[in-house]
Amino acid sequence: MSLISRMLSDVFRGRGPGPAREASAQALCAEGARQMEAGQLQEAKSSFEAALARDPGCRPAHMGLGLLYEREAAPEQALEHLRRAMRDSVAERGICTLAARLMQRTGRLQEAETLLLRLIAEYPGERGLTMSLVDVLRAQRRFDDAIARLEERLVSHPEDAQARAYL
């Protein structure tokens, strides 16, 4: 299963049957995910946009459009949709990590830091999150904070060669 399928299916998982408009939006999102995997990006975009026309709060449609805009190197549009997909939740770690990376790339370092700290609180053992936070701290020229994070990581995970190399 591809990354796109996993991310979108995580959102669908656990949702019972809802109103008809939500079901049709979900069907359009599933079609959009299939189209993305097949490389039919314009068709996928149309499917996700149609899903949003039926259900403006459809998280999978926002996730799909966020991923598409990220592929198109349109970080502002990608972030707009990823923020709507996240809705104060860090449950979709992959989407949140992508959003944090886009925030960092577009100079929203404080916003990226805040999001990464929320993710680290939710998923404390994830090395990639710590390393992303270290990158954000370094971009802010907060080297002492970055070093402290790396040292914390090495206390709990002394085998982490990447954290050791960053020091």
Image: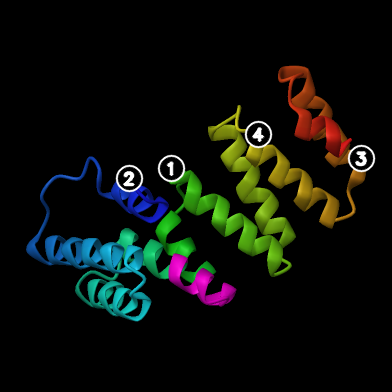
> Mark 4: which secondary structure?
helix
Give, as a single range, the part of the protein colored magenta: 67-77
- Residue at image point 90% right, 54% down: 141
Magenta stretch, overall SS: helix
In this rendering, the answer to whether 131 lies above or below 64 is above
Labels 2 and 4 touching (C-beta < 8 A): no
Confirm or deny contact between disc 2 and disc 1 (CB under 8 A): yes
Q: Which residue is drawn at the image coordinates 36% and 71% (left, top)?
A: 39
Task: Say which amino acid is labelled 2.
Answer: Asp
Q: Amino acid at mark 3?
A: Asp
Question: Which is more toward the observer, 125 or 158?
Answer: 158
Q: Which residue is mark 1?
A: 91
| Numbered badge on residue 127 | 4
What residue does disc 3 label?
Answer: 144
Q: Three-letter amino acid code at disc 1? A: Ala
Q: Give the residue type that dot 4 points to.
A: Arg
- Please state which of residues 23 and 35 is positioned toward the viewer in this rendering: 35
